[in-house]
Amino acid sequence: MNRGVIAEPQPRDFTPPAEFSPGAGSPLQRFVNLLHRYSIGFFALLFLLLAVAGIKVGGSYWSTKAVNAVKPAVALKAAAPTIAGLNLTVPAAGLQAKLQIITNQPATLTVGSQAVPVGADTIRSWLQITASADKSQDYIRVKAGAIAASLTQQANQFVKAPVNQVTVSESGVSQVVVGGRDGTSLTDPASLKTQAGQVAKTVMDGKGLQFNTPLQPLAFQSITPAAFNKLIDVNLTSKQMYIYQDGQLLQQYGVSAGGPATPTPIGEFHIYEKLPVQDMWGYGPGHKYYFQPHVYWVNYFTGGDAVHGVYWHPLSWFGAINSSHGCVGISDSNAQWVYNWAPIGTTVITHA
């Protein structure tokens, strides 16, 4: 049997080249064959390359965005503040001249019937100066609150608390030991704030300023030792000390107060310092130096004057002779009782 020509076996995936395809041995053909054979691996590699490129591009984008986010903002030229009402803009070269006009204008605060000049330093404290960014001009602002505060401070110098009249019973005799005196208060303190707000609109005109606030009297009251928790009453003439608690007389002691050349101050005071023992020294009449060691039970009530014990005089001295340098001396035993009884703040009244 004529079997003819026997064909060579071919691989299953063999595809004969097209009629006009490049030769099987050309580089392009080999590349195509390679793609065909390793198509899955090729696409995986291509995806990986694209992913890497995407990450790189994306990372660069977000890095740039982050850097831009932390970059300092481009400096913009500061806009000039809005100037209106209580503000004024002046060239830097003219600032001092303008301030002279504002601060040296005549200004007066009348409190009751008393006229008080308002000085240049006070007016200057009402102003706030701010320079522009390029230093070419200055902005002057009036602080209405500062005007009201300074006016109130000056007016309050004329406010006085009333001094109450104090009447005590000394050895059965009623006696006024502190004379009463009326005080004063501002009739309408809020009016100064109102005036300050009005003047704040014109203060930079430099044409003069006027303020006023009336005063009203505050009447004193008449009181007795019952108005005090604890009271030490010293009669410098009779040389007697009366000690009251809640209006009740607890003790009466003879004293030796300031001598004629060094009298004890007269008035209403309060104990401000206490010392159990102290050396005392100073200068008496004729600038004669004195030194007294170990003075016990010291209760200072004004300046260098105190109620304290005196051990260098006999008991007959107390209630009979005033010879101290201004202090109120009593016997050591009586002084110890007073020291233990009278805390800091106890009222001490001395009178003739």
Image (spheres, grey):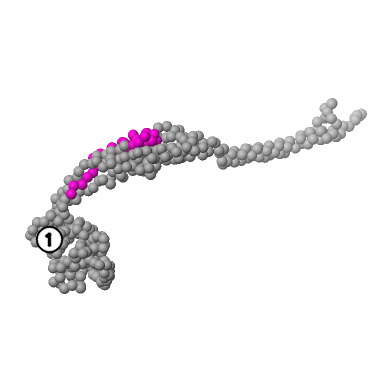
**Closer to us: 179 or 46:** 179
Query: In terms of depth relative to the viewer, which is nearer, 333 or 167?
Result: 167
Describe residue 313's horizontal placement relative to residue 140 as left or right.
Answer: left
Residue 119 x %, y %: 35, 43
Q: Position of residue 103 (x, y in %)?
A: 39, 40
The single residue placed furthest to the top in the displayed view is: 19
Magenta highlight on residue 115: no
Q: Amino acid at mark 1?
A: Leu
Residues shaded magenta:
181-209
The residue at the point 13 percent across, 67 percent down is 319
Using the rendered view, name the quadrant where residue 247 is placed. bottom left
Res 34 quadrant in image: top right
Residue 207 lies within the magenta run: yes
> In this rendering, is residue 244 above or below 1?
below
Q: Residue at x 46, y 34 (%)?
A: 89
- Position of 262 with respect to 119 (left or right) is left
